[in-house]
Image: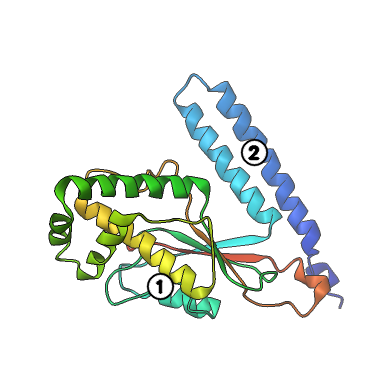
Amino acid sequence: MSTDFLQPNLEDLQQDVISLLKKIEELMYRASNLLISDPSGKKYAGFQKEVVDAKKNVEDLELVMAIVAPMKAGKSTIINAIVGQDILPSRASAMTTLPTEIILRSDKAQPVLVLKPNTISCLKRTLSTLQQKIKTNGLNQAVTKMAKYPHLTSLIPKIQDGFSIQSEIGGLEGIKQTLTDLNDIVRVCTVLEPLIDPLNQEYFDVPCIYTPFWKATDAGQSKFLGNLVIVDTPGPN
């Protein structure tokens, strides 16, 4: 008995899904425009954006997997094990405050951390706010206020002196140190300026790490193997 009919053509299947999502996108667009004066119009515009994002994932053959667990449950450790590199910082005290995407690509030779312009702008505003707070109240008071978090106190003078944020950082050690500093800046802000949003989340784009994962042995199939994106998340507690 032939089972050829059970073997899907991946390229045709991909195109079928993209075509279906395009039709759904058009329906959401029409609904949002017809209901533009109604509050539900925004809801359909939001649905349209979700469909556009889903369509791009299918076009890129990209699977997004979020790792969610309480603080200190080992999320970063699990991701490091999946990636096969010690790429995310970890320590005894809580680390992750910034959701971070780890994009595994077979065409990458070395890992690189990419910070988008919106991310850099948000972090620079937070740094400016902290510098003003330290200048107004004094370095000693800021260090005293952080006494419950001794692993963060060494960052206070660094913030006061000025902190350079680059758009691209290469190498494992550079990536880990940068992510440690950025996560800790957010934690310092929640202590020294608890009433402000350190990320201005309406405009914040999560940091992305592009890193090698595996190499396909069959060149003819490699373009259909797709990419895996893992999202490291802050603990909900």
Across and down, in percent, residue 138 comes to 16, 51
Q: Nearer the viewer, residue 192 or 103?
A: 192
- In the rendered structure, the answer to whether residue 82 lies left or right of residue 17 reads left
Q: Residue at x 69, y 39 (%)?
A: 23
* Quadrant for the C terminus in the image: bottom left
Three-letter code for the amino acid on which mark 1 is drawn = Pro
Q: Nearer the viewer, mark 2 or mark 1?
A: 1
Across and down, in percent, residue 174 comes to 48, 70
Q: Nearer the viewer, residue 76 or 129?
A: 129
Q: Nearer the viewer, residue 232 or 170?
A: 170
For numbered disc 2, what is the local secondary structure? helix
Q: Residue at x 48, y 34 (%)?
A: 43
**Residue of label 1:** 89
At label 2, counting other C-alpha atoms closer than 10 Å, the crowd grade (few under 14, some 14-19, many 20 or more) is: many
For the residues bearing labels 2 and 1, Cβ distance under 8 angstroms: no
The answer to whether residue 54 shows anywhere in this view is yes
Q: Nearer the viewer, residue 58 or 5?
A: 58
Across and down, in percent, residue 82 comes to 52, 77
Residue 25, numbered circle? 2
Across and down, in percent, residue 74 comes to 37, 75
* Quadrant for the N terminus in the image: bottom right
Q: Residue at x 48, y 68 (%)?
A: 175
Three-letter code for the amino acid on which mark 2 is drawn = Glu
Q: Residue at x 58, y 22 (%)?
A: 34
